[in-house]
Amino acid sequence: MADPLRLGIAGLGTVGAGVVKIVRRKAKLIEARAGRPVTISAVSARTRDKDRGVSLSGYDWEDDPVALARRDDVDLLVELMGGSDGPAKAATEAALEAGKDVVTANKAMLALHGPDLARAAESRGRVLRFEAAVAGAIPVVKALTEGLAGNEIDRVLGVMNGTCNYILTRMESAGLSYETVFDEANQLGFLEADPTLDVGGIDAGHKLALLAAIAYGVRVPFDEVELEGIERVSIDDIRRARDLGFRIKLLGVARMTGRGLEARMSPCLVRADTPLGQLEGPTNMCVLEGDESGQIVLRGAGAGEGPTASAVMSDVIDIARGTRVSTFGVPADQLGTVSMARSATPAPYYLRMELMDKPGALARIATVLGEAGISIDRMRQYGHEADTAPVLIVTHRCARDALDRALAAMPETGVLATEPVALRIETV
Ligand SMILES: NC(=O)c1ccc[n+]([C@@H]2O[C@H](COP(=O)([O-])OP(=O)(O)OC[C@H]3O[C@@H](n4cnc5c(N)ncnc54)[C@H](OP(=O)(O)O)[C@@H]3O)[C@@H](O)[C@H]2O)c1
C-alpha cells in the first residue's frame, strides 16, 4: 500500500472541524481518489478541552501550531486558524522551512503575503494551495489555474461575500433598512467578529486580489485594490435600481487594461435578468471570461463548515495524488509587478440625487454632466417630497474621472438637497 499522506491540522473551528469530519467519514473514498490513505497525525487549537462536534481520538495534540508544523510525522500542514499574520503565518513559514506542503483557507494571509509564501514553498519544491480561501465550495482557483490555463483572461468578476449578498437581498425582499438587516445578520452569526471585514468589502477584496493574481500572473498590491463596502447602500437605491431593471450587488471586478490592472470591489448595479442579478441570499458567484472559453459562471456556497472543508479537501487530495501546481498558476518568482488603474474601464453610472424644487434645476445638472463629457441615457423624476424631488439618471458609458469631475462641480449649481449617490453599472 502507498504511504499515507499525514496531515497536521492547525485550527479546529468551523472549517478545521469540518475537515476532520471529512477525513474520518470518507477515508475509503479519499484513499480511492488520492491513490493513498490520508490520515491525521496531530491537531492544534487554542483550547484543548473544547467540544468540536467530532472525535479527536487517535490524534496528538500540540498547543503550539509552529511545533505542529515541524513534526516529523506531518507531511502537510492544513492551516485553518485565520489572521493575516501571527500564528497562521508563523506556522505556514515553519512548515515550508521544514519541507512540508501547506493547504490554507486564509485569504487575508495570502492577499498580503501570498507571493512571498509561494516563493518560499517553490524554492523548496513544496506547494502551497488555497482553494478554500476564495468563494468557499466553488472550485474557482482550480478553474483559473487549471481549467482555463490555455486562455488569456479578459475579466474576472463575482459576488464573493455571502453575508453582503444576504444583507442586500434581504433588504430588497423585506423592504428593510441596511441598519435593521445588519443587526439581523449579526444576531444570526453571519458577520465576522470585525464586521467591517464583511460589509466594508475587505474580505471580498482579499479574494478578488487572489483571483487577479492568478488571472494576470502578477503580484497584486492589496492596499491599491479599490474597496467600497455596502454600508451606504440604501433601501431607496435598491428600490430605484429595481424600477430600472437592475439589482445592487457587492461586485468584484478585475481586468487588465492598457493603463494597468483594474481591481475593484464595490456596490454595482447589474441587470436583474442575469445570473448575477438573480443571485439570492448568502450564495457566491464567480464569472470568468477567457478569450477562448468565453464566459464561465460558477455558483455555490461561499462559506460554512461543509462547503469550505470540501474545498480544503480538494487541495489535500491533489497533493496526495502528486499534483503539483504553482500557487498562483505560474512560479512565484515569475509573478510580475503591476501598476494599478483606478476604474479605468468606462461604464454607465446610476446617479440618484435629491434636487431642490426650483425651475431649471434638472437643466443645471444636465449641463454639469455635459461639461464633463457625460451624456444621459435615461432620466426619471419622482413625486415631490416637501420642496425637493428625487431624480434618477442613468448615464451613457463614461470615465470615472469624468464622473468625479461632474460630482465635484454639482454642489456649485445650488440645486442639490443632498449628496448624490453614484453607482457603477457593470455589464455582464
Ligand atoms: N468559516 C467559513 O465559512 C470560512 C470560509 C472560507 C474561509 N475561511 C477561512 O478559514 C479559516 C478558519 O476559519 P473558521 O471560520 O474555521 O475560524 P474559527 O471558527 O474562528 O476557528 C479558528 C480556529 O483557530 C484556532 N486558533 C486561533 N488562534 C490560534 C492560535 N493562536 N493557536 C492555535 N489555534 C488557534 C481556534 O482555536 P479555539 O477553537 O480553541 O479557539 C479555532 O479552532 C480562516 O482563515 C477563514 O478566513 C472560513
Image (spheres, rainbow, N blue to C red):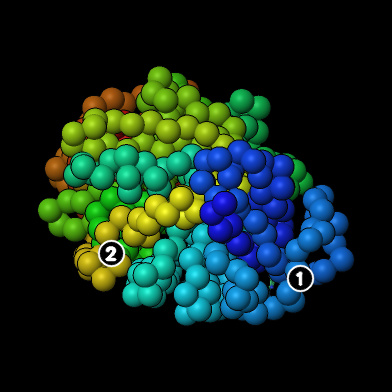
Q: Earlier in the sequence, mark 1 or mark 2?
A: 1
In the image, is 210 to the left or to the right of 293?
Answer: right
Tell me if the residue at label 2 has its CB under 8 Å from ligand 1: no
How many marks do you count on the picture?
2
Q: Is residue 171 above or below residue 311?
A: above
Q: Which amino acid type is marked by label 2?
A: Pro
* SS category of the residue bearing label 1: strand
Return the x and y of residue 260 as percentages of the image width and height: 19, 58
- Quadrant containing ligand 1: bottom right
Q: Which amino acid type is marked by label 1?
A: Trp
In the image, is 51 to the left or to the right of 176?
Answer: right
Q: Which residue is mark 2?
A: 331
Which residue is painted at 22% across and 67% down in the image?
Answer: 334
Quadrant location of the C terminus? Answer: top left
| Numbered disc in front, either 1 or 2 | 1
Which residue is painted at 71% across and 57% down in the image?
Answer: 13
When asked about the image quadrant of residue 365, the answer is top left
C-alpha separation, residue under disc 1 versus residue under disc 2:
34 Å
Graded by Cα atoms within 10 Å as few (under 14), some (14 to 19) or many (20 or more), the crowding at tag 2 reads some
